[in-house]
């Protein structure tokens, strides 16, 4: 027998709260599933984000002990692939870096102060700036020679890590943006007015969601940088750092950058958070597979997607550059 709804005049505060929650229940024919309280879903969201970070840290600690991959040669940074002039690769890297400076000064600085477009709050801002900084660092490293073999191992290691993070996170941010364009328009959130689709076609959004992919494809085509299975955790930690920054902003402004990630969305927000981390995982391993011909092959001892160094005589060998 159905329970009568409490009236506004006779119901107690407890009954009113129960009735409000009942309006948000999940109903399947005669079966009603009570929607969990916001405190429960918020705790679940925080726990999942922390768990993804723990998985990333475990990966970073465990994989170097399993994969047997020696340091990447500095030649991978300083040289282009077979048949591609180094000057062309250098122009790509330097041009990307200079455009990144313009992007930060004009868009994130000037336009933000005048129009309040955005203040480095979106994931695509983070990923595009990271790409520009990484390309600038790669261009700078092309100007010098390694004084002795292994002298720049630490520098090369950092650049290979940044390169892998650029691939996975830029793929995720661009995929999310174009999914939003077609299926989840957010113009009111992005621009403050509902001017769809114009808000997605601003020059800076096209830079973050289309130009970034062009740069990555050209870097892959011109350059010799590999990707390593052991660096997977850094992409997850980058996304986790962004989530923490968004939460900190929410604490001070009471505004969530992306509507679907608001704590008030409950279980759907929980799904979106896990979807973002899972999507980053897929993007990383897809990129890793793409880079396999660059001199790293499957190492069965460490798993299907683990890649090890393949010795080579120089950057002009085979179809992809291999360096010793």
Image (spheres, rainbow, N blue to C red):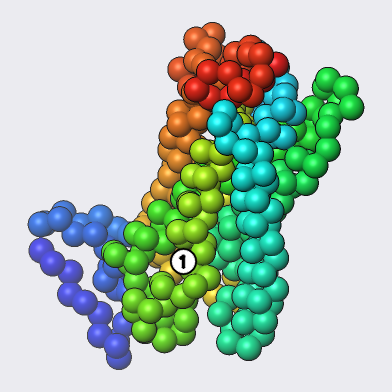
| Residue 302 picture location, percent across and down | 55, 14
- Quarter residue 69 falls in: top right
- In this rendering, position of residue 57 left or right of residue 155: left
Question: Residue drawn 79% across and 35% down?
Answer: 155
* Front in this rendered view, residue 153 or 230: 153
Left or right of 306, for residue 61: right
Q: Does residue 322 appear to the left or right of 306 in the view shown? A: right
Which residue corresponds to the image point at 45% horizontal and 28% vertical from the top-left?
289
* Residue 146 spot, x, y in % from top left: 84, 29
Q: Tell me if I can see residue 229 in this picture.
A: no
State whether residue 208 appears in this view: yes
What percent of the width, then of the height, locates residue 169?
53, 48
Residue 118 left/right relative to 205: right
Q: Which residue appears at 53% of the width and 24% of the height?
A: 320
Res 286 quadrant in image = top left
From the image, tell me which residue sits under label 1: 206
**Residue pictured at 53% horizontal, 51% vertical:** 215
Q: Quadrant of the C terminus?
A: top right
Q: Residue furthest right?
A: 147
Q: Residues within 10 Å of mark 1 (few under 14, many from 20)?
A: some
């Amino acid at each position: 027998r159905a329970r009568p709804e409490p009236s506004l005049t006779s119901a107690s505060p407890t009954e009113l709260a129960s009735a409000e929650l009942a309006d948000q229940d999940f109903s399947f024919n005669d079966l009603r599933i009570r929607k969990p309280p916001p405190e429960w879903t918020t705790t679940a969201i925080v726990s999942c984000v922390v768990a993804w970070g723990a998985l990333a840290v475990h990966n970073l600690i465990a994989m170097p002990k399993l994969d047997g991959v020696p340091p990447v040669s500095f030649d991978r940074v300083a040289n282009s692939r077979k048949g591609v002039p180094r000057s062309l690769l250098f122009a790509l890297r330097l041009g990307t870096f200079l455009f990144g400076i313009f992007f930060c000064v004009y868009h994130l600085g000037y336009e933000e102060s005048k129009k309040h477009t955005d203040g480095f709050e979106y994931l695509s801002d983070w990923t595009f700036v990271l790409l520009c900084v990484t390309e600038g660092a790669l261009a700078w490293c092309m100007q010098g020679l390694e004084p002795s073999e292994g002298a720049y191992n630490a520098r090369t290691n950092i650049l290979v890590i940044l390169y892998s993070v650029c691939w996975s996170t830029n793929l995720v941010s661009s995929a999310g943006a174009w999914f939003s364009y077609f299926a989840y328009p957010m113009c009111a959130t992005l621009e403050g007015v509902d001017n769809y689709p114009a808000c997605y076609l601003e020059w800076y959004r096209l830079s973050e969601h289309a130009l970034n992919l062009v740069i990555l494809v050209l870097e892959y085509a011109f350059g010799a940088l590999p990707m390593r299975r052991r660096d997977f955790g850094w992409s997850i930690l980058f996304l986790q750092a962004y989530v923490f920054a968004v939460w900190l902003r929410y604490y001070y402004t009471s505004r969530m950058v992306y509507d679907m990630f608001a704590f008030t969305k409950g279980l759907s927000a929980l799904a979106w958070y896990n979807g973002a981390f899972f999507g980053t995982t897929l993007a990383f391993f897809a990129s890793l597979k793409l880079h396999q011909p660059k001199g790293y092959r499957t190492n069965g001892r460490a798993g299907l997607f683990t890649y090890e160094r393949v010795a080579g005589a120089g950057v002009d060998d085979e179809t992809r550059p291999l360096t010793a």
